[in-house]
Amino acid sequence: MIAVYISFPMKAKVFWQLKNITMFFPGVVALNNVSLDIYKGEILGLVGENGSGKSTLIKCLSGIYQPQKGEFYYQGKPVKISSSMLARKLGVSTVYQEFSLVPTLTVTENIFLGRLMKDKKGFVDWGTMYEKTKSILDTLKIDIDPNKIIYNLSVAEQQLVEIAKGYTANGSLVILDEPTTALTAPDIKRLHELLRRLASTGHTIIYISHRINEVIEVVDRIAVLKNGELAGIANISEITMNGIVKMMSGRHIAEHYPKQCNVQNEVILKVENITTENGVNGVSFEIRKGEVFGLAGLLGSGRTEIARALFGVDKITSGKIYFKGKKVKFNNPRQAIEAGIAYITENRKTDGLFFNLNGPKNSTTAKIKKLFRSNRLRILDLKKECKIYDESNKKLKIEPMSKYKMVGFLSGGNQQKVVVSRWLFSEADFFIMDEPTQGIDIGARLEVYNIINELMAASKSILLISSDYLELISMSDTIGNLKFGRITSIKDAKDVDKKLIINSSV
Amino acid sequence: MNAKLKKKSISVSNFIGPLIAALLVAVVVGFTTDRFWDLDNLNNLALAVSIIALLSIGSTLVIFIGGIDLSVGSMIALITMAMSTLLKFGGWPIAAGLLFAVILGAILGAFNGVFTAYLRVPAFISTLAGLSIFRGAAFLFNNGSPIFSISENFEIIFYGKLFGTIPLAFIYVAVFYIFFILFMKYSKLGREIYAVGGNETAAKLSGINVKKVKFIAFIIAGAMAGVASILMASRLNSGSPNYGSGMELSAIAAAVIGGASLSGGRGNIINTLFGALTIIIVQNGMNLNAVPTSLQGITLGLIILIAVLIDMWKAEVAELFKKLIKKKV
């Protein structure tokens, strides 16, 4: 364990102190002797691969887990965080990846959830709460109407409300777990500005993310966890992105996006002027065999909507699609799958996986009839199912126990690979990948990128949608820039500058 | 080797719980009365369990897709009345009457299915409407009076024995359960039922015709109500608009005691049989001990609660047992 202790602005006071935090679950050491000082008013980045112990550490601080060994010091005094209630009393406010907002209530109701203000007669005092919410949102420069129902807000706005909620609860230590997964570049910028303002008013922030390039833009110091140990901690001015990646995984950044080029001349998909009812507005593009076509654009610019239209989920009101040289019209996903299209959805939990089924069963759902013993005997061959799963697993390297485990018990990376295995099984030629690396660690990401390369080498094609611009530019051959449901430009990925995409999308 | 072992233990643990529950109540009831293990009583028990066991196959499938069917009890009333009318007054041959019962059941199931799967009325509502409609329709026959003595020797269907020893009702249960266990495991539709119950959106995006799968589940539930109706009618050689009242709840209880999750996608058909056995054994035990009706209802309700609690807190209960055992050692 190499722990380099560097004090953030030398004069800053130690706010929280973690000493030798050790936590083990049956069979696994999740945290091993982690010691960490957190200074008042700093933004501390916490990075590490999946399973490195980030979440566990946060849950210890939030009172959800009690570590078997180690002490917490709050402003120099030893404290026991034995419940999440106690953590909140100590000013720890955690914003988890899964939001805790109630979608059917208003912003005000959510912010005051569980501690509604009452007037003298004991009635709920809506007026004061509205005013208070308004002033909080104003202070944080969040431009959202307090009377709006959460359901109607964008994901980014919900994130901001979530943070405002933590702020109102007098959180002196705000912990953000993967706050940018669902956000686009301008939203991330807004979020970062908000965090800066919070820090300048004396709040302390712990910022957890997979996206190191975003973390380094906002944090003062960065702590790297690896295999449950603190691999290092440094002032952000004193470390490079390369250094961080190396500390996290032992890999070099150039290996981070192993792009291979396999573009052939034959066009597999040609889209002419398609329009749908929900936001695709006369879009045209072509994808060749072996090509990764990246769609850049903000959340809501029509990226996912194009995917849905191509896959037969949304109705196309005008325009033509040619697939493998033939004019096609898919009325439902079944027809698209039959034709050889695969759709890796944005959210594997809500619309990708069957948590009640194990790995092999999840991987065959898109073409169950391939398991028939024969055309006549339409009985599933379960042995064949397992055999095919083992076979594809040689390439995908999914956790071996996934053969028996329900997929809900697998890590995010393994889950994503199960989704990929489904479409390999369906023998698709054209893959739509919507945020394929969302919420998975560097190791698993790398494997997804390698799968992309292998698919391209096998003359398949991909429509790649990603909010991670670095990933999008690095892994695509061509980039189509999307704005208000229209493609504004199509360029060779090599000619696209990261900043340019962000700017032209705004 | 290790993995194989683990696989086995996983699949065994899937149905061991409900089986133990059924055996446990049998042992307990056996202690309270000597008559329980009498061959005559066991025979009665097999007969009593057969109707609920068959009916609950359909209820379980509907629960698997994340739905619920409240109408199957009323279907029994309507089907026995319609079938009895045709057999007694219409002069239909018995075989035709039996076929009619199953087909009518399937049609009634399709009625539920259209509203639930295609017109998106929540299953609870559409089958609640079915519960009322089918029961009402049953009273349209024979001026709302029961029809007795449908046909000579009609009871044989229920009370008959194969080779003079094995009760026919027992064979029906065995045949249908084996068929549906295999159906769920080895058929495309069985797999699709689990998929739809597990995640409807994912199922749709995997190219599964979600509406059709749901529709068929309701049709099967109706057809199984038709099968249950045949046994019900032949048991007393009669049809009655009051038959099957409350049976939909017993059928759901059997599925739930068997560990089927009401949110869909989880459970095993075979466990529904153990669930049905548990219910019937408890009822039988209480009848043998002359427990008043009021207490019977309360006991049955408590058993449903306990079964579901144990299923929900399986891991914690196992942990508790481990601790207790350790302390003793």
Image: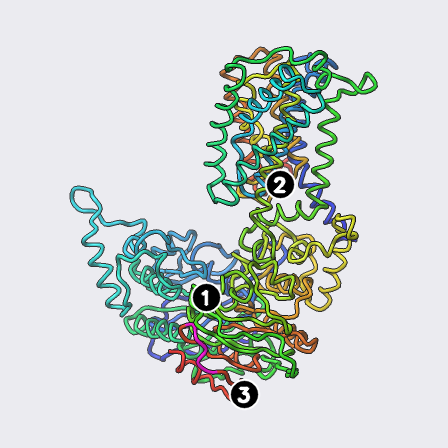
In the image, residue B127 sits, relative to residue B193, either above or below, namely above
Which residue lies under the disc numbered 1? Answer: A276
Q: Chain of mark 2?
A: B
Q: Overall secondary structure of the magenta stretch?
A: strand
Q: Out of A444 and A478, give the one closest to the viewer.
A: A478
Which residue lies under the disc numbered 3? Answer: A494
Position of residue B271 in the picture relative to residue B122 (left or right): right
Q: Chain of mark 3?
A: A
Mark 2 to mark 3 CA distance (whole Å): 52 Å
For badge 3, the amino acid type reads Lys
Residue B323 at x, y percent in the picture: 60, 40
Position of residue A339 in the picture relative to residue A82 (left or right): right
User: First in sequence: mark 3 or mark 1?
Assistant: 1
**Residue at image coords 20%, 58%:** A131
Q: Chain of mark 1?
A: A
Asked which quadrant contains residue B267, the reply is top right
- Which region is colored magenta? A485-489
Q: Is residue B172 magenta?
A: no
Mark 2 to mark 1 CA distance (whole Å): 40 Å
**Residue at image coords 57%, 44%:** B214
**Residue at image coords 31%, 51%:** A113
Residue A443 at x, y percent in the picture: 60, 71
Which residue lies under the disc numbered 2? Answer: B267
